[in-house]
Amino acid sequence: MNRSATKQHHRTYGASTIGADLSIKYPHAFTHMSVSPYGRDVVLAGRAGLAIVDLEFPLSPPRTIPISSKSKIAGVAWCPNTQHHGWVATPVSQTLLVHDLAHTTTEPMLVIKAHPTTITDVAWVPKIPSWIGTASIDPIIKIWDARRDQKPVWYFSEWEPTDLLAFNNLHMHKMASVHRNKIAIWDIRYGSGPLTTISDAHTEDIVSISWHPNSED
């Protein structure tokens, strides 16, 4: 996205645009997006770093957080729990960054060298607000507690690279992982192997996964 808005001629930066159709361009490319737990803000992630956009006033200049890295940002995830409403996780190469947007600093509150190979996805555990999972090209899935030191709380392996992660919205122990076109369903209390796998769930590689918001299945 880039920053030069169409339909800007009758609006000012301080005017709410709720209900209006807008096209907004930004000077940097963003490849990932996540929504705040209150639904008012979005965070955009790209090589230039993070941009936080107020959806009620999207024409106002976004807050920016530079991330100094030559590596591609693999995703961004805003903590879905209002208890930690400012926490945003960003994987950069092998490192997990967590920023607290409730504070004005641009420095991350947490920096973890999470994997020996590139992180492919991050996902918060909705029912345990401080827990976040990381997937990687290496075969290990890890869960971290953002309040603690740099040792994972849990780790699992399906013995092949993991592309995507998703935690159940209602059941704190249920997790889904994607491995190309296969889906594995886990109970994180029993990490020796998945509860079930769906082989060849699609003919092509799976590009997105999420749980039903109101169901444990």
Image: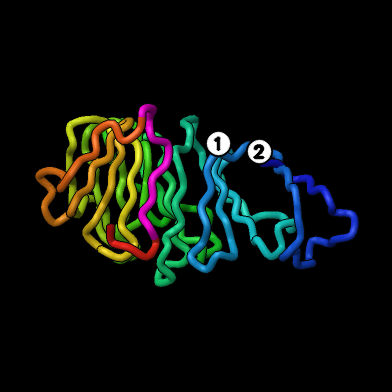
Point 21% across, 38% down: residue: 140
Q: Main secondary structure of the magenta part?
A: loop
Q: Is residue 146 visible?
A: no
Image quadrant where one finds the N terminus? top right
Single out the residue that lies furthest toward the bottom: 83
**Quarter where residue 160 is shown:** top left
In the displayed structure image, the side of residue 98 where residue 168 appears, left or right = left
**Quarter where residue 138 is shown:** top left
Identify residue type, mark 2.
His
Density class for disc 2 (Cα within 10 Å; few <14, some 14-19, many ≥20) is: some
Point 22% across, 33% down: residue: 139
CA separation in Å, label 1 and label 2: 8 Å
Identify residue type, mark 1.
Arg
Residue in the foreground of this view, choosing between 140 and 104: 140
Density class for disc 1 (Cα within 10 Å; few <14, some 14-19, many ≥20) is: some
Q: What colour scheme governs how the chains and residues are painted in the rendered image of this protein? A: rainbow
Give percent across and percent down for residue 161.
Answer: 27, 31
Dot label at residue 62:
none
Span colored in magenta: 203-212
**Residues at marks 1 and 2 touching, judged by CB atoms closer than 8 Å:** yes
Name above or below for residue 52 compared with residue 94: below
Point 28% across, 61% down: residue: 216
Q: Earlier in the sequence, mark 1 or mark 2?
A: 2
Q: Circle 2 sits on which residue?
A: 28
User: Does residue 204 show up magenta in the picture?
Assistant: yes
Q: Circle 1 sits on which residue?
A: 47
User: Does residue 213 show up magenta in the picture?
Assistant: no
Give percent across and percent down for residue 13.
Answer: 79, 61
Residue in the foreground of this view, choosing between 166 and 33: 166
